[in-house]
Image: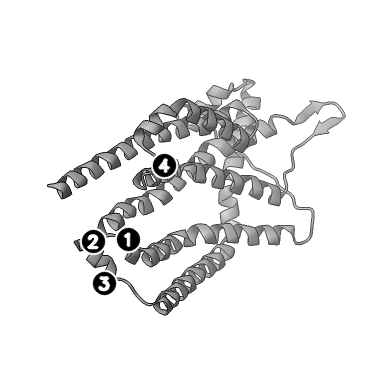
Amino acid sequence: MSYDDTEIESSRAPLMDHLVELRQRLIISIAALILGFLACFFFAQDIYIFLLHPFEVGSGLLAEQKLKGVTHGPFDLLLTLVGLKPMPETAAVKMVFTAPLEFFFTKVKLAGFGGLVVAFPVIAWQLYRFVAPGLYKRERNAFLPFLLASPVLFLMGAALVYYVMLPFVMWFSLSQQIVDAGKVSVELLPKVSEYLTLATTLLLAFGLCFQLPVVLSLLGMAGILSSDTLKSGRRYAIVGVCALAAVVTPPDPISMISLAVPLVLLYEVSIWCVKLIELRRSKDEAAEAA
């Protein structure tokens, strides 16, 4: 029996012990989720104002455009949002709610979303601690980088939405208004609940899409995918990424490109990650054979 097999045998426990440990992990995870919800609900108004910053940026871009009498092209706007051109000052925004308790329930939904984000590291760690005894030592060491990379990639996707996507979407939406047209006026007055739905949907969509390297690397580690398979399927992956970007993002080319380009780059990174996993596996097998 190898050292790894001995390690697994020594970590085995009766079924009741596993159930007791599972209950303990669930209690800790639920407690973290509740504490995160309460903390986010206490600061729900501040968090909502924070989420309104992209709306303020989009309004500022449109206000500067009207003030200077110039028209921002999509790529000029993109350069502004990524910091290659000066950013105008933010503008005031006005939102409405049409039901007496709409904003209250909006804050409850926001607290739920924020609580899940805040508690996710605790939940992920509890899940890892529960399954870790069933893994070999080398598997535990290989799994930890993915546990750290997953929230980092999620934050990268969320940052892309917050600093680029949402300001562009709000600029585009506000530019559809009809003003100074005599007696006709069409003005955007978004509801607080609808804006929250848009913001959280985009944040989740981009954050989850940015998990592509983690998913593909884990599949490669499990032997389900190889780097050669990923290379040969590159063209199909690009088509799939473009289709996904077209479905997830608002119906404009800049939004689609903003998601498609990073995903294609992450796909290429995934190929190299799987290749490194294969090289390390071959090296370990050669060492064991010797």
Q: Is residue 163 left or right of residue 122?
A: right
Q: Secondary structure at mark 1?
A: loop
Q: Secondary structure at mark 3?
A: helix
Q: Residues within 10 Å of mark 4 (few under 14, many from 20)?
A: many
Q: State the separation of the CA atoms marked 3 and 1.
A: 12 Å
Residue at 87% across / 29% down in the picture?
A: 183
Q: Secondary structure at mark 4?
A: helix
**Circle 1 is placed at which residue position?**
135
Residue in front for this viewpoint, 34 or 5: 5
Q: Nearer the viewer, mark 4 or mark 3?
A: 3
Disc assigned to residue 10: 3
Query: Residue 223's x, y, as percent?
Result: 36, 44
Residue 87 appears in view? no
N-terminal label among 4 and 3: 3
Q: Nearer the viewer, mark 4 or mark 1?
A: 1
Q: State the separation of the CA atoms marked 1 and 2.
A: 9 Å
Query: Residue 240's x, y, as percent?
Result: 54, 31
Q: Is residue 69 left or right of residue 206?
A: right
Q: Residues within 10 Å of mark 2 (few under 14, many from 20)?
A: few
N-terminal label among 2 and 3: 2
**Circle 2 is placed at which residue position?**
4
Residue 62 appears in view? yes
**Circle 4 is placed at which residue position?**
216
Q: Picture quarter containing residue 171?
A: top right
Residue at 32% across / 61% down in the picture?
A: 135
Q: Amino acid at mark 3?
A: Ser
Q: Are marks 3 and 1 in contact (CB under 8 Å)?
A: no
